[in-house]
Amino acid sequence: MKRIFIIAGEVSGDTHAAGLLRELRTLEPDMKVLGLGGPRMQEVAGDGIEDWVETAGVVGLLEVLKMYRYFKEKMDAVLDALLDQKPEAVILVDYPGFNLRLADGLRRGGYQGRIIYYISPQVWAWKKGRVKTMAKVLDLMICIFPFEKEFYEKSGLRTEFSGHPLVDRVATLKREWKREPDLVGWFPGSRVNEVRRLFPIMMDAAKAIKLAVPGARFAVSAANEKLAGFMREMADAHGMPEAKRWIETGTVYDLMQRAQAGAVASGTATLEAACFGLPYTLIYNVSWATYVVAKLVVRIKHLGIVNILAKREVVKELVQGSLNPDTLAKATVDLLKDAPHRQRFQQELADVVATLGTGGAYARAAKAVHEVTATPPC
């Protein structure tokens, strides 16, 4: 019986890992799965998955430093367990801060099994030199963006492009709806720290938007009821109790299809918005310490993946100091008032999304894992 250990450290990684595991089960029904992940992975693999994503999914330099001891102890425990149990394969899903260190630690500790990385870490953006080390410790990279395959293969690392899982998910969620005139969709992120920084800016921007577009209406997508409650408290504290009426829970993909324009926190949701054809502005605001460090290490011109794929600014990016209520209001009003601009924007989004594959991403990824683990390492 083949044994694999799989690790995802964030909500999105939990989703992708679960999709991969589900397809792997069809190829190898008797496979034993252990690992770290979240509730979706548990649905597929059972109690062998430890649910840690709520704790592990922190963002920002200071936030990670505060939890250094926790991550150090978890790393040591996982390394010890894997070097003792020696599963045939270890699958690492995104989450590079932890997973790349684990891969290196496993090889240094003498692990001889397959190490497979799914959902490429964006080293092409922040540390290209890391690819040489990755090529030494990994057996396979499975990437979800087309340009990544050539990038990794130049280092000698075996790489497969599986296509992006969003293509499949969006196909099941699309509705034949017409966009509601003057409806603005706010997407402040799925983490408390993101919402704390972005929602007040959205509330103030709404005031300016109403002056320019009197018929404007607003809806805010909350990732869960806990965040919805937090946003209601923020609305009261901000002196805008009417903003509580904007808040929706569990309707993110519907809202991306209903809204005429919007603003989306940097991250996976920006690509989801593109897949649904939402004309939007990318917004990003973190602690200044995190931002300064990021500026020192990031080596690409654009932050948003749509712009990276397009190699130009398709989506307007309001980042850190350039993000304030006035700039967000202006970008949103421009989208609401200029119909030809919106139509061009949506066509450009569709052109980018077309590069992500035609579906079946998890099945192709599972096939690649199955093939590389079918033969023992040399």
Image: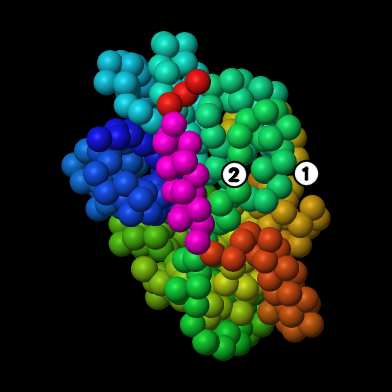
In the image, residue 43 sits, relative to residue 220, either above or below, namely above
Picture coordinates of residue 334 (x, y %)? 74, 74
Residue 88 visible in the displayed image? yes
Where the N terminus falls, by quadrant?
A: top left
Q: Residues within 10 Å of mark 1 (few under 14, many from 20)?
A: few
Q: Amino acid at mark 1?
A: Lys
Q: Is residue 370 magenta?
A: yes
Q: Amino acid at mark 2?
A: Glu
Q: Residues within 10 Å of mark 2 (few under 14, many from 20)?
A: many
Near-viewer residue (22 or 17): 22
Q: Determine whether, in the image, residue 122 is placed left or right of residue 197.
A: right
Element marked by disc 1? loop
Element marked by disc 2? strand
Residue range in magenta is 360-375
Residue bearing mark 2: 160
Residue 63 visible in the displayed image? no
In the image, residue 339 sits, relative to residue 319, either above or below, namely below
Going from the N terminus, do you reach mark 1 or mark 2 first? 2
Q: Residue 301 got which mark?
A: 1
